[in-house]
Image (spheres, helix red, strand yellow):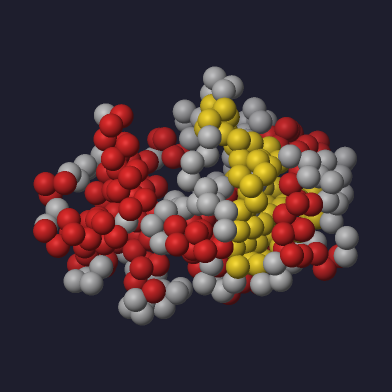
Amino acid sequence: MKIENKISVILPVYNSEEFISKSIKSIINQSYKSFELIIINDGSTDKTKEICESFLKKDKRIVLINNTHKGLTASLNEAIRISNGKYIARQDSDDISLPNRFEIQMKWFEKNKNGVLCGTDCKILNDDNSFKQNKAIQFSDYLIKKRLTYTNCFVHSSVIYLRKYAEKFGFYDENLEFAQDYDLWWKLSTVGRVGNIRNKLVIIRDRKNSISRNKSDQQTLSFINSCVKFYSFRKGLININENKELIYFEKNKITKDIVILMKYFYSDKLSNKLSFKNLSLAQILKIFFFPYLLTRKFFKNLKL
């Protein structure tokens, strides 16, 4: 492959000694060879640093950065800023890429000349080593862009995107503690073609101590903040890189109903629940504009 198609793989690690070796091996054994692997150690206190250092001697494509603990978003941006690839690929420290992942995704970019973001389907591995289906994903540019207005449909560990467009948006928004991936995806979707490959090219772990389980409130509110920001951008209320806290959207007469509806639809992930009886008549009429979220809400209620 030509050097201009080089990929910079960003791998943030924090106390990842249990899985990091398998994760690194899955990258360095890719069939697509033109990449650098930037591992950013975010102040690990276990043996993660030593394990990562052992790989430096085995593969010159690996760069290791050791930092004090800064958090995920700041770590991602620091690694991207020192990268020199045309494309940015992501993987988390407990996930695994199948050997032909990069090769298949780069073929997608070759086919889609205006492509800016490509993800893949995945296998989700539970703590008991059983697999479950990824139900949130969409594959075509049209359906993804439609779905991105109210949900995320990319697996963060599966994506490759064009660095120059991510730089245009300041990379990941450091004002968001969580949902920084979704925030970047919808921004990228405004400048080019996006897609997901149907092949299950990554294995991600759904662990009991994951962020999505332990910090569900913060993660969900960050997502809602970015989701309503996207709505406001499409309505011409704010610029694409303009930062607004959720309270701004809650007080704005144009966006306040959208905030309430998102909190209602995603109340299963919030400790402060919002029920149907809390909605105004105008808000009740608007819920039918979100058939996917309405269906999701229905099936979530069935499980209660």
Residue 265 in view: yes
Residue under the image location 45 percent in, 62 percent down: 146
In this rendering, would 242 be left or right of 143? Answer: left
Residue under the image location 46 percent in, 53 percent down: 152
Question: Whole-percent x and y of residue 198?
Answer: 64, 47
In this rendering, would 296 be left or right of 12? Answer: left
Residue 66 in view: no
Question: Whole-percent x and y of residue 19?
Answer: 66, 31
Question: Whole-percent x and y of residue 82?
Answer: 70, 63
Residue under the image location 52 percent in, 48 percent down: 137
- Which residue extends farthest top? 128
Q: Name the image quarter holding residue 125.
A: top right
Q: Is residue 235 above or below residue 149?
A: below
Quadrant of the image containing the N terminus: bottom right
Quadrant of the image containing the C terminus: top left
Q: Name the image quarter holding residue 250.
A: bottom left
Residue under the image location 61 percent in, 40 percent down: 122
Q: How many marks are shown on the rendered structure?
A: 0
Question: Whole-percent x and y of residue 54?
Answer: 81, 36
Q: Is residue 195 above or below residue 14?
A: below
Q: Name the image quarter holding residue 147.
A: bottom left
